[in-house]
Image: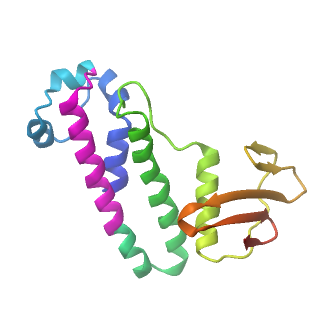
Amino acid sequence: ACPQLTNILRDVGEDRVRQRIYIPQEDLRRFGVSEQSLLKGIKDEKYVAMLKFQIERAREWYQKAEGGIPMLAPDCQLPIRASLDMYSTILNKIEANDYDNFNKRAYTAKWEKLLHSLVELGQASILALPVCLARLDLGELRAVEGRHALLGLHVPHLGHHLAVEVGERLVAR
């Protein structure tokens, strides 16, 4: 449910062009947002209040979903956690775009998905990563086929920096 709600919020602008509305009618009424204003792309205080409500709702669902991850089979936990983290960052991007999901599409770039995955690997204490990168140049990430990649990133919620050698090991500093 939480990734679906996130997709709905992310895609409001695209859906508007197609004359589609996926935000629940009940919520539109609750915040006084008309279908006409939504389809015209009017970002007023009512619309922003509704978006803030939807984002908070999605975050609550993500939090509840996260609590269930330990109940999953161990081999399912990491991909589910990574998926929740990646989708929840879309909510941050909607906020960073000043709630303008009519004209600015909030998304997680491929390099950000890679970083999220590496962070999750670090949290899961997995020490071996397969060499699966060809030729990339993504910020601090450098990889050339046949060589190891080194990635240095700061992970605030872990309280330290991570240095990752893809194909070798994960080392916390």
Residue 142 position in % (x across, y down): 81, 49
Quarter of the image that includes the C terminus: bottom right
For the residue pair 3 and 118, the one nearer the viewer reads as: 118
Question: Relative to 101, does residue 133 appear above or below in the rendering?
Answer: below
Question: Would residue 134 appear left or right of 96 to someone viewing this image?
Answer: right
Q: Residue at x 23, y 47 (%)?
A: 53
Question: Relative to 46, does residue 103 appear above or below in the rendering?
Answer: above
Q: Residue at x 18, y 32 (%)?
A: 46
Question: Relative to 24, does residue 39 appear above or below in the rendering?
Answer: above
Q: Is residue 36 magenta?
A: no
For the residue pair 86 and 155, the one nearer the viewer reads as: 155
Examine the rendering and report whether any part of residue 70 can be seen.
yes
What secondary structure is the magenta-colored segment mainly? helix
Question: Would residue 42 appear left or right of 30 to someone viewing this image?
Answer: right
Residue 120 figure quarter: bottom right
Please give the range of residues in magenta. Answer: 41-64
Examine the rendering and report whether any part of residue 22 can be seen.
no
For the residue pair 171 and 143, the one nearer the viewer reads as: 171
Residue 165 position in % (x across, y down): 80, 64
For the residue pair 57 and 21, the one nearer the viewer reads as: 57
Question: Relative to 29, does residue 38 appear above or below in the rendering?
Answer: above
